[in-house]
Image (cartoon, rainbow, N blue to C red):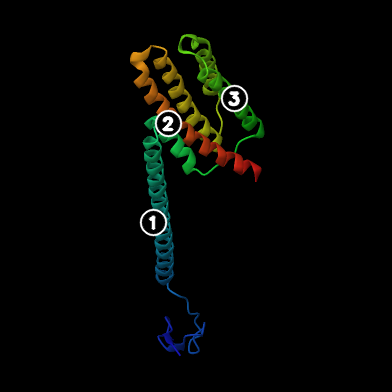
Amino acid sequence: MGVKYCKACKKPMKSTETHCRTCGAEYKNSPVILIVILLILIGLCVFTWSKYHSNKVELENQAQYEKNKQIDEAKLDLQEKGISPDVAQKVAEIKSNETKTFSEVHLKEFENILSEWSDAERVAGSTSRISLAQPVSRLQEIKRKADSLKYSGCLEASRLLYLTAMNSHIDGYLEFMKGKESELAAQLKFIDYAKQLEQAENEFKKCQVHDEK
């Protein structure tokens, strides 16, 4: 059992006693001790919060690093498939957020545009070089319509990828219309279109599957 001493008569007291048995004086703890204890508690709180904050920042930095790495990898993959760096960056960022939220109205609207494009594409593909002006004009009109829209989530990523493909396809026809000397350039554009269209279709299918769920 601990022992303390009366501050008045200096006689020993039990640690549990509040008054001296010898002189009857009340034993009061020194305010210095209380201040020291308070400072220790404050120090512990500050240390604990600092440690928590440091760990939180470290986790956030790690998460951001992983996200940036994912974006860079997705961007590189898209560029290898013929997507421009600017569009690849936007699509990669959208995909990294893992959001597929979009309205049913927007989905139907975009499906209608793709249907129009498909019909116009078939017409252009069966038209002779000398008569391509009107079919290509129709393709450009549909592309401008798609370009004027703005969606969210994976539907926006799909729109951006389809726009890239549409541009390549139209450019291919414009080269083809110049004559035989531009057929190689046109063919390269059509090859780009095929790769870009595949990428756009794959992304759009993911959106449609999510919507069905």
Which circle, 3 or 1, is nearer the viewer?
3
Mark 1, residue position: 54
- Mark 2: amino acid: Val
Q: Position of residue 77 (x, y in %)?
A: 39, 40
Q: Residue at x 39, y 63 (%)?
A: 43
Q: Secondary structure at mark 2?
A: helix
Q: Position of residue 122 (x, y in %)?
A: 55, 22
- Mark 1: amino acid: Ser
**For this rendering, which residue is in front, 1 or 22?**
1
Mark 3, residue position: 113
Q: Number of callouts in the render?
A: 3
Marks 1/2: CA distance? Answer: 36 Å
Q: The N terminus appears in which quarter of the rendering?
A: bottom left
The quadrant holding residue 168 is top left
Q: Earlier in the sequence, mark 1 or mark 2?
A: 1
Q: Is residue 146 above or below residue 31?
A: above
**For this rendering, which residue is in front, 181 or 150?**
181
Mark 2, residue position: 87
